[in-house]
Image: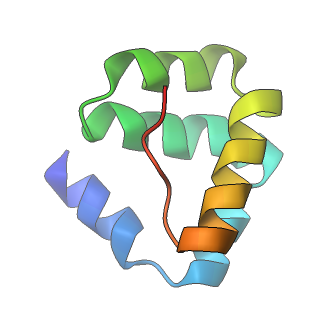
Amino acid sequence: MKQYVSFIDGLPLILKVILALPALDNIVYGIYRIAKGNLLGGILCIIIGFPIFFAIDMFTLITKGKITVLV
């Protein structure tokens, strides 16, 4: 799982933003949250994530350049 986190962290910002688009965000960043140790946030992101986590992920990517592991 550490390899997955380092892979995602190493991607250019434009690819991170593309992966945060609605169809991919739930899976890619849901697994990312689980790998970072936030099991509940990852499961919620995968199951019900689109409206909530899509907005959070886009905001944090644009402002900080990385995904936060909220919730």
- In this rendering, the answer to whether 47 lies above or below 59 is above
Q: Residue at x 61, y 66 (%)?
A: 61
- In this rendering, the answer to whether 25 lies above or below 39 is below
The answer to whether residue 13 is left or right of residue 7 is: right
- In this rendering, the answer to whether 27 lies above or below 43 is below
Q: Quadrant of the N terminus?
A: top left
Is residue 65 in sight in this rendering?
A: yes
Question: How far across and how far down the image is residue 13, in percent?
Answer: 58, 81
The answer to whether residue 45 is left or right of residue 10 is: right
Frontmost residue, 54 versus 71: 71
Which quadrant of the view contains residue 51?
top right
Q: Residue at x 80, y 44 (%)?
A: 22
- In this rendering, the answer to whether 62 lies above or below 46 is below
Looking at the picture, the colour scheme in use is rainbow
The answer to whether residue 56 is left or right of residue 31 is: right
Most extreme residue toward the left is 2
Is residue 20 in sight in this rendering?
A: no
Q: Residue at x 75, y 30 (%)?
A: 52
The answer to whether residue 64 is left or right of residue 31 is: right
Q: Residue at x 28, y 55 (%)?
A: 4
Question: How far across and how far down the image is residue 9, in percent?
Answer: 36, 69
Badge count: 0
Frontmost residue, 43 versus 53: 53
Most extreme residue toward the front is 63
Which quadrant of the view contains residue 26?
top right
